[in-house]
Image (cartoon, grey):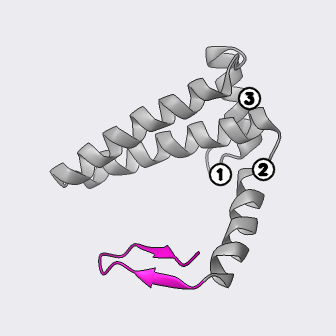
Amino acid sequence: MAGQHETQSTIAGWGEETFGPVSDPVSLAKRASIEMDELIEALEKGDTKEAERETADVLILLNRLGATLGFDLADAVDEKMKVNRARQWIPAGDGTGRHES
């Protein structure tokens, strides 16, 4: 796929070819959680390249989860951002925050 970006469909196809069909979507979420822990570890070490790879692993699993559950991850992000943009947010001072009820 040189020069082309992967899509949810190509990622899901690769996942099914490589690992077989998803028998339980929870397994994908749990694996994404493990990859997220590895991302945090890379960030704590200041290893930007490893953080890049672990971020990709998380996104690969989430794309596969979306395909398994029948939704497009990019569309879900777009819809959620509409909700987020309409909320009132309280910054935490560290680049994160929480929304008011």
Q: Residue furthest toward the right?
A: 70
**In which quadrant is the C terminus drawn?**
bottom right
Disc 3 residue type? Gly
Determine whether label 3 and label 2 are within 8 Å by CB: no
Q: Residue furthest toward the front?
A: 101
Decide if residue 63 is on the left or right side of residue 92. Answer: right
Residue placed at 78% from the left, 36% from the top? Answer: 69
Residue placed at 58% from the left, 36% from the top? Answer: 61
Q: Which residues are magenta?
A: 88-101
Asked if residue 89 is positioned above or below residue 51 in the image, the reply reads below
Q: Position of residue 42 (x, y in %)?
A: 25, 46
Disc 1 residue type? His
Asked if residue 54 is positioned above or below residue 99 in the image, the reply reads above
- For label 3, count other residues whose C-alpha is less than 10 Å away and answer few (under 14), some (14-19) or many (20+): some
For mark 2, what is the residue?
72
Q: Can residue 1 be spotted in the picture?
A: no
Residue at mark 1 to residue at mark 3: CA–CA distance: 14 Å
**In which quadrant is the N terminus drawn?**
top right
Disc 2 residue type? Asp
Assign a secondary structure to mark 3: helix
Q: Is residue 92 magenta?
A: yes
For mark 1, what is the residue?
5
Residue placed at 76% from the left, 67% from the top? Answer: 79
Q: In this orientation, which residue lies closer to the viewer: 15 or 58?
A: 58
Q: In this orientation, which residue lies closer to the viewer: 26 or 100?
A: 100
